[in-house]
């Protein structure tokens, strides 16, 4: 803010410096607003977790299938048959992506139709998850990123 006019040699020079500072501050704030308002929205390409985060809302195995790759679903069905457990897919990732969970994307590497994404859980209803770094392999099927847990499930057969 501008100081009140003072008496003395430097008052005019001080006011000029303060006005320049104020102009610079306004310019910087305007630039920041413009940069953020012109930034593209997040898409599945920039944050593949957006395609799978709704899995926490699933209540049935059938609902969860739309978030997993076809090979993962096949392996889950084989595992279900072997152990007579019908909730294999719900037990994998639904506990991570529940209402109230927030994350920070750490790293994403995409190669053709596969993606490895790492994120840090910053908020979660279950305190044990906060601070946990999760790495998930995703595969792009039918234009959407889906969780690929085929290797993990086949290792249990």
Image (cartoon, rainbow, N blue to C red):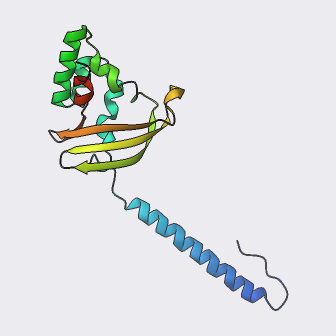
The answer to which image quadrant residue 76 occupies is top left
- In this view, the residue in front, 135 or 45, is 135
Q: Is residue 97 left or right of residue 149?
A: right
**Which quarter of the rendered picture does the C terminus lie within?**
top left
- In this view, the residue in front, 74 or 36, is 74
Task: Count the numbered circles shown.
Answer: 0
Seen at 48% across and 65% down, the residue is: 32
Seen at 33% across and 24% down, the residue is: 92
- Residue 133 position within the rendered picture, expressed as x and y whole percent measured from the top left: 44, 38
Q: Is residue 1 left or right of residue 62?
A: right
Seen at 59% across and 77% down, the residue is: 23
- Residue 119 position within the rendered picture, expressed as x and y whole percent measured from the top left: 41, 42
The answer to which image quadrant residue 143 occupies is top left
- Residue 49 position within the rendered picture, expressed as x and y whole percent measured from the top left: 33, 40
- Residue 110 position within the rendered picture, expressed as x and y whole percent measured from the top left: 25, 49
Q: Is residue 112 above or below residue 153?
A: below
Q: Is residue 90 above or below residue 81?
A: below
Seen at 20% across and 27% down, the residue is: 72
Q: Is residue 128 left or right of residue 10?
A: left
**Which quarter of the rendered picture does the N terminus lie within?**
bottom right
């Amino acid at each position: 803010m501008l100081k009140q006019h003072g008496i003395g040699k430097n008052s005019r020079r001080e006011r000029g410096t303060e006005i320049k500072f104020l102009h610079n501050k306004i310019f910087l704030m305007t630039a920041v607003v413009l940069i953020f308002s012109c930034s593209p929205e997040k898409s599945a390409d920039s944050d593949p977790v957006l395609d799978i985060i709704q899995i926490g809302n699933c209540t049935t195995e059938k609902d969860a299938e739309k978030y997993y790759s076809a090979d993962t679903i096949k392996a889950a069905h084989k595992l279900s048959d072997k152990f007579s457990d019908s909730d294999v897919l719900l037990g994998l990732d639904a506990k991570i992506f529940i209402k109230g969970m927030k994350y920070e994307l750490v790293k994403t590497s995409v190669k053709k139709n596969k993606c490895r994404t790492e994120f840090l859980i910053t908020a979660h209803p279950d305190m044990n998850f906060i601070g946990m770094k999760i790495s998930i392999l995703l595969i792009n099927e039918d234009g959407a990123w889906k969780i690929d847990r085929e290797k993990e499930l086949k290792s249990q057969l």
